Amino acid sequence: MATQYFEHKLELGNFSESPHFQLMEWHPSLNILAVASISAGTNIFFYGEDGEHDEGAHVQHFGNAYCMAWHPIKKTLAIGFSNGELMIWNGSNRRLESVIVHKNCITSLILNPDGTRLLSADQDGLIIVWKADSLAQVSQQSVIVQITVP
């Protein structure tokens, strides 16, 4: 059994091999911790501030998660994967929604302060603005700058 210690002990479940904990994100207002284990895919577990595991909440995916970002108010987590997939987990109804628009690894996710827009950026320099409630693409912009050395 793998264990992570904070002020409270977190029981992270049984693993056939030693898990690799790559990502952890606190919800800014709901005191929920998302912990992503990357080992032959991704498993994301959810905990309360007292370290109690929410056994009904679990995200499993064949790909490797690279970044996560919580909605500032809602129990909603955005997850960016190395294959360019963007996944939204709605903790209220435990539904998953995903899109693949990025061609490479999503390296950064951020929501605006009121949670209406989600920005995703990939390793190629593409930034996409999304409507956070529907994953409808609002705009995209490549920010790659070519530098030539004399």
Image (cartoon, rainbow, N blue to C red):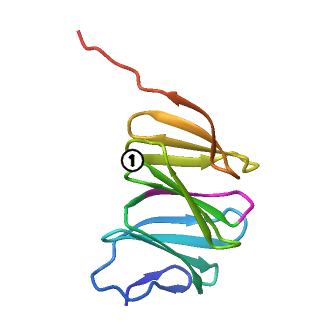
Query: Badge 1: few (under 14), some or many (20 or more) residues near its Cα, within 10 Å?
Result: many
Question: What residue sits 55% from the left and 37% below the top?
Answer: 128
Which of the 4 quarters of the picture holds residue 37? bottom left
Taking the magenta stretch, the answer to whether it contains residue 72 is: yes
Taking the magenta stretch, the answer to whether it contains residue 93 is: no
Residue 150 in percent (x, y) is at 23, 9
Residue 99 in percent (x, y) is at 52, 51
Question: What residue sits 63% from the left and 49% below the top?
Answer: 135
Q: Secondary structure at mark 1?
A: loop
| Image: 23 above or below 14 | above
Question: What residue sits 73% from the left and 63% below the top?
Answer: 74
Residue found at the far top of this picture: 150
Identify the residue position indicated by label 1 in the image.
105
Which of the 4 quarters of the picture holds residue 50? bottom right
Question: What residue sits 52% from the left and 79% below the top?
Answer: 6
Which of the 4 quarters of the picture holds residue 69? bottom right
In this rendered view, identify the residue nearer to me: 67 or 105: 105
59 relative position to 15: left or right = right
Name the amino acid type tagged 1: Cys
State which region is magenta.
66-74
Residue 25 in percent (x, y) is at 55, 64
133 relative position to 106: left or right = right
108 relative position to 110: left or right = left
